[in-house]
Image: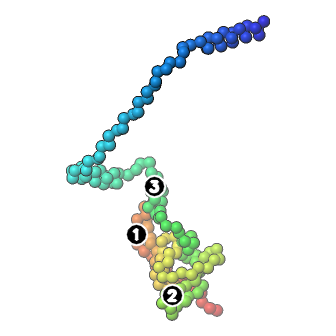
Amino acid sequence: MKKYLALFVLMAFAIAGCGGQEPSDEKVVLKRPQRKQVVKPQQPTAEEKEMVEKKIDITRLKRNPFLSYLAKVKLRRQEKRIKTPLECCEVGVFRLVAVVTGVKRPRAVVQAPDGKRYIIRKGDRIGTKEGRVVAITMDSVIIKEKIRDAEGNLVGTEIVKLTLPEKK
């Protein structure tokens, strides 16, 4: 009995859904959106330029309360170049192995803490404190490092000398 009742209800819905209006032959016209006129920006006046420059200067002086101190120091020290393997650790852990002098550009061989050896020349970077090879003498390599304070400002420079080990 329930089956017949359900069938009757479904047929009633089907008949009610089939009826309706006949499709009309009217054409449907779609309107295209009008193109917006492009307004060319006007050149700012001298006064406006001055105001913009002042705002930029003021915003540079304001400090960001949401930026941590460590992130600020890290942003200052962040460089866009790729660091070499010689910039992995302090200059003091490198060992001078050999020096080649008597040529136009003297060279030296240093050994890193991991046992690898590298050839360095004048001007190469070495160490974590932005050290540069300043000179290569017959028995040593002179490196100039930058000293920075806690905020990352340059305080001074330090000269480090790597010497060849004495022969026994």
Q: Would you place residue 38 above or below residue 83 in this image?
A: above
- Across and down, in percent, residue 123 comes to 47, 79
Q: Determine crowd level at label 3: few under 14, some 14-19, many 20+ residues with C-alpha closer than 10 A.
A: few
Sequence-wise, which precedes: disc 1 or disc 3? 3
Would residue 63 be visible to someone looking at this image?
A: yes
Location of the C terminus by quadrant is bottom right
Q: Secondary structure at mark 3?
A: helix
Cα distance, mark 1 to mark 3? 19 Å
Quarter residue 30 falls in: top left
Cα distance, mark 2 to mark 1? 30 Å
Sequence-wise, which precedes: disc 2 or disc 1? 2
| Marks 2, 3: nearer the viewer | 2
Look at label 1 and name its amino acid.
Val
* Residue in view at x 66 percent, y 9 percent: 12
Residue that protrudes farthest toward the front in the picture: 25
Q: Are marks 1 and 3 in contact (CB under 8 Å)?
A: no
Q: Secondary structure at mark 1?
A: strand
Look at label 2 and name its amino acid.
Pro
Q: Label 1: which residue?
A: 155
Q: Are marks 2 and 1 in contact (CB under 8 Å)?
A: no
Q: Would you place residue 53 above or below residue 4 in this image?
A: below
**Which disc, if any, is residue 106?**
2
**Which disc, if any, is residue 69?**
3
Location of the N terminus by quadrant is top right
Q: 41 and 104: which one is in front? A: 41
Q: Determine crowd level at label 2: few under 14, some 14-19, many 20+ residues with C-alpha closer than 10 A.
A: some
* Residue in view at x 50 percent, y 78 percent: 124
Q: Are marks 2 and 3 in contact (CB under 8 Å)?
A: no
